[in-house]
Amino acid sequence: MNQKFIRFLFYFFLAAFVFVSCDEMDDVETPVTGNEYLVEATLQESYSKTQIDLLIAIASTQYPELADLADLVKSGVEVYKITYKTTFNDETINASGVVALPDAAGDYSVISYQNGTNTLHSKAPSVDTNNDLFRILKMMGSTGFVIALPDYLGFGEADQMFHPYLHHESTVQTVTDMLKAVEEFVENEENISLNNDLYLAGYSQGGWATMQVQQAIEADASFAFSLKASACSAGPYNLTTLNQYVVGLAEYPMPYFLAYIFNSYLQLGLTTPINSVFQEPYAAKIETMFDGNTSGEDLNNQLTTTIANLFTPEYLSGWDSEANYDEVLSMLQENSVPAFVPKSQTRLYHGTADTYVPSIVAEEKYAEFIAGGASTNQVQYIPLVGLDHTGGIIPAGLASILWFIELENSTM
């Protein structure tokens, strides 16, 4: 973790501590009835405009771009956990997420932010109310947006099931159903309404999820929201490109990412024997590692960063050519972002020093968009020079929000 980020956290949490007694609520439930998607809404916390002004002032000492928001804060925010209905394997299941509402009357657009890779139930957006990035995002409702943070399946209300990591169909379903639940929630609120404009953003797994949702929404003319812009950051958009990159390395610093993918696909029906892909003793561990209580760091410690020791020689030489691995290759292809040409304003942010998800996947996707006919005014690739995967999280999130505010204000 870089020193700038550590200093930011120190100042951020110092300010948060000053206000903690008036930030947190005692789980005030808001009754909801007669909805197709929304099941329950619970008030978790609130931030006054004064609190938000002070927190932005302090945080901008470490992230100067935040100072641009100082004059854009219009209100406080109220933060709710919502539970909503979605489907998985043709069965109805309850999922959850966070919604932050401005506490001032108005007609608002929605920003949906999809979070990055996580293995801990305690770190889901609706559970981890003190997460620094989530707190910043929730406070951004004060600039004139309704903010949505989905938990994903396997977390929050759905933590009794496995997390279908990097699974196209369930990810799109979960995020779009939450947006429908947000619409129903706001319909029950006095003085607040939605103008049906939507902005999407996300980082890492969330960058991939954002692009998947963008493609699905743009292909569905009946979807209730009008997508205005999408900011996809550090996502593994093409999983075959990511796999090709990894098997060509001597060392890969995040082996649990790879185990997470294969555990998910095994749960989703992959029949390729795990020990034909991973070597022992790692193969025997993978299906029991992801229990919701073990961090990525601890999972990495159970694996190896040496690629020649992690994967079998057969997989390394034949993952994309041998019949034994056809099913694996198909799963990677099916869960990569489909080929499409964006209809909405789109930005791809990616750290140039990212060794977890290499920037080549963003560069490749950008080239595909341009080759498909997108203009360079509509689609932009923005390298985050010198930033690695962790270091790019906050800068990409802030850049996305500032861009959305600029677009929103330009249409008023």
Image: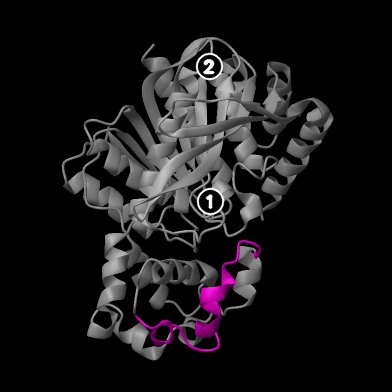
Can you tell which quarter of the image residue 217 is in?
top left
Q: Earlier in the sequence, mark 2 or mark 1?
A: 1
SS at mark 2 in the image? loop
Q: Residues within 10 Å of mark 2 (few under 14, many from 20)?
A: few
* Percent coordinates x, y for residue 307 in the rendering: 47, 81
Q: Quick one: label 1, few (<14), some, or many (20+) residues within 10 Å?
A: some
293 drawn magenta: yes
Percent coordinates x, y for residue 170 in the rendering: 38, 52
Indicate the secondary structure of the residue bearing disc 1. helix
| Residue sitting at x 56%, y 57% | 160
Q: Which residue is mark 1?
A: 158
Magenta stretch, residue numbers: 272-294
The three-letter amino acid code for the residue at tag 2 is Glu
Colour scheme in the image? Answer: one colour
Q: Marks 2/1: CA distance?
A: 26 Å
Does the magenta segment cover residue 207?
Answer: no
- Tell me the quarter of the picture where residue 244 sits: bottom left
Front-most of 337 and 128? 128
